[in-house]
Amino acid sequence: MNASWLYVLSSEFGSAAEVLFAVALVLLAIALRRRRPEFSACCLLISLSLLVDLFARSSTGSPKLALYARALALVLFLFGLIRLTLELVVLAARRGRAHFSSIFKDLLLVLLYAVVVLAILRGTLAVDITPLLATSAVATVVIGLGLQETLGNIFSGLTLQLQRSFLPGDWVRFGNHLGRVQGIGWRSTRLLSRAEERIEIPNSLLAKDVLTNYTAIAIGDELSVQLDYNDPPGRVKEVMMRVMQNIPEVLSHPSPEVYAWSFEDSGIRYRIRYWLADYGPADQVRDKIISRLWYALRRHSLDIPYPVRMVHMHQPTPHEQVRAARDQQTIEQLRQVDFLGALEDEELRLLLPSVRIHQFGHGETLMREGEHGESFYIMRTGTVEVLAKAPDDGAAIHIRDLTPPAFFGEMSLMTGEPRTATIRARSDVEVLEINRHGFTMLFKQHPEVAEQVGEIIAMRMSETRGAVAAAHTTVGDGSSRHRLLTKMRAIFDF
């Protein structure tokens, strides 16, 4: 190694060229100091090696000093060359978007530096390195015992690098700390919080505890809001979904979800779940969602209730005019039913005590095929679907949709037979339910009404039967009406 290439270079170009080359490297190092400090250090090491080598060749009066100077020059040059090679590898890896471990680079740099020093001592200075290696082994044991925590952080950092639990740029949460990963060092991992705070977390702690990585194809987030009990859940969900679909940062796949989550003291709590492509602007997106929800809820008269407590008190009787108007509206809705349309107001008024107003949400079943029913329904708002079981496999078959002022369930009410179809809400639905007690009072006081109702229902039964049944028997004749009236007398006891 005494006949290094430095001597060949100096013999061909001379000392002046070597000095110019060293100066050029120093100027290049100064130029790269801000933009590429890692390459600046490499240039300084190589330029310094050239100057030391020039000093070694000029020290003709002291051969021993010249020998040490040449050894130092060779060490500096190899240090600079090794570091330059590793930095070029790191640069190529980062350009290819590969994850290159800085810990691996630093450990490899120290190992190569040690190999170079030992090689120069053995080859250039003819030093016996066997005692040195033995001493180094003992020193390593002593240092290892004193630096157990530091070594634990180093090996934990290597483990994190190998597992790739996270990469630089990922958003992670560790305990109460949330931030974007800046890098993994020898001792700690650096996070940059949303408040631009630099957080250093020891690698050994990261390797032992639970860590949440928010970097994925879709990052979920959620919030909750409480609304009044008087607001139908179906309508609330529709308004909330429309708000979520109009926010660009919220992903459409997977689509946002809105759940009626729990009954609280003051209202129903709704849980809104949505997904983002990047966790970074999560706070800004949450602010946008809450702000737009406020405006949307106001526009649709949906109230966010204050904390309340229910106090049961005796309520006075409604004003006579208000109650009369409400009863008259109900009577008009009852009159829309064909078998009630010919009745007088006083006769229909007997049904009012048995009338109840009910609300059903989308997908709820109002009545089920095969069940016994003691009431029938008149639609006020919304849409329902009529379903019947297929005779072969029992699968539900869609028959038709019903909208106001349709009614259903009267056959089972009047005849006592099981329900012949399933009725399911296709939207939020409001209906009037009239139970059997009201008809019992009506028929007992006006038996002639039962005959009118029975005739109309018998005629409808004949229309709903198949052509074959109609060909063999006439349901609307007197005998059929008599049988139906007999059933009604038994059911309503009049």
Image (cartoon, rainbow, N blue to C red):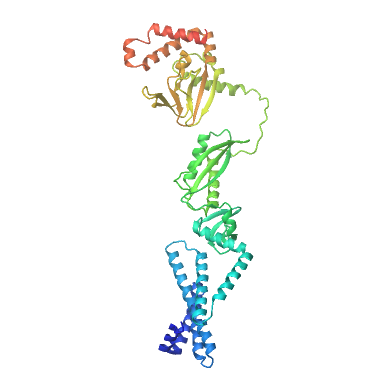
Check the image and report above or below for 354 versus 102.
Answer: above
User: How many callouts does the rendering have?
Assistant: 0
Residue 481 in view of the camera: yes
Residue visible at 63% across and 64% down in the picture: 145
Q: Quadrant of residue 147?
A: bottom right
Q: Position of residue 475 (x, y in %)?
A: 37, 11
Q: Position of residue 399 (x, y in %)?
A: 38, 25
Between 315 and 92, the one lying in front of the other is 92
Between 357 and 414, the one lying in front of the other is 414
Check the image and report above or below for 245 versus 414.
Answer: below
Residue visible at 57% across and 72% down in the picture: 134
Q: Position of residue 101 (x, y in %)?
A: 49, 63
Q: Position of residue 245 (x, y in %)?
A: 47, 45
Check the image and report above or below for 326 versus 90.
Answer: above
Residue 31 in view of the camera: no
Residue visible at 45% across and 8% down in the picture: 485
Seen as rendered, the residue at the extreme bottom is 61
Between 355 and 23, the one lying in front of the other is 23
Between 99 and 5, the one lying in front of the other is 5
